[in-house]
Structure formats: C-alpha cells, structure tokens
Image: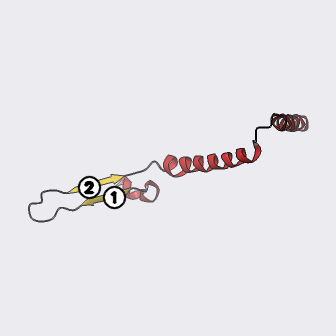
Amino acid sequence: MIMKLFHWALLTRYSGKKPEGLFPAAGSFTTRTPDVILDLLLLPGGRYGTEIALKIRRLIHHGDVGLYLLYLAMVLCTLLAASILVR
C-alpha cells in the first residue's frame, strides 16, 4: 500500500514470469527499488564533477613549476583580498 502511494518517488522496477497452466512448474517475481538519492543524483553528479575536474586539470597543469607558483600566488592574493573586503 505504501509502495503504491509513493510509486512516483520510489521508482520501483518490477519483473517476472507469470506461471502458466493448471499446475505450473515455475514462476518468478522480482522488484528492485533503487536508492533514489545515491543512484540517481549523487553518483551521476560525482561522475560529471570528476570529468569537469579532469578537463580543468588537463588545461592548467603542464608540469611547469613556475606556473604552479604563479597560480598559488594568485589564489593567495585573491583570498587575502576577499578576507580584507569581508571585514
């Protein structure tokens, strides 16, 4: 009863084979209810975020230490300016 009431949110998948005949030898019934938040939101979102982070990493990182120090200095200056403006 509760599953029928919340079928729109649970996304339960039903499958099975109906028994046939007067005295059926076999029949099956299975259901699968995915974890909606984990399976449909967090995992795909994490994969997408990982792909974007890898693309950014490929654009930025080329092995030049001087360039890395410049990035670090720019981030530190930005954080310092933001902390001064927040006061």
Q: Residue at x 43, y 50 (%)?
A: 34
Q: Amino acid at mark 2?
A: Phe
Residue annotated with mark 2: 29
Q: Crowdedness of circle 2 by 10 Å Cα count: few (<14), some, many (20+)? A: few
Q: Earlier in the sequence, mark 2 or mark 1?
A: 1
**Distance between mark 2 and mark 1 Cα atoms:** 8 Å
User: Which is nearer the eye, 68 or 77?
Assistant: 68
Residue annotated with mark 1: 14
Residue lying at the far left in this picture: please name it.
Answer: 23
Q: Amino acid at mark 1?
A: Tyr
Q: Crowdedness of circle 1 by 10 Å Cα count: few (<14), some, many (20+)? A: few
Residue lying at the far front in this picture: please name it.
Answer: 63
Q: Residue at x 29, y 53 (%)?
A: 30
Position of residue 73 relative to residue 24, above or below, is above
Position of residue 1 relative to residue 66, above or below, is below
Left or right, 1 with reference to 53: left
Per the image, label 2 sits on a secondary structure element best described as strand
Left or right, 60 with reference to 2: right
Q: Residue 19 location, x and y as percent? A: 17, 61
State yes or no: discs 2 and 1 in contact (Cβ < 8 Å): yes
Q: Residue at x 88, y 36 (%)?
A: 77
Q: Residue 65 location, x and y as percent? A: 81, 34
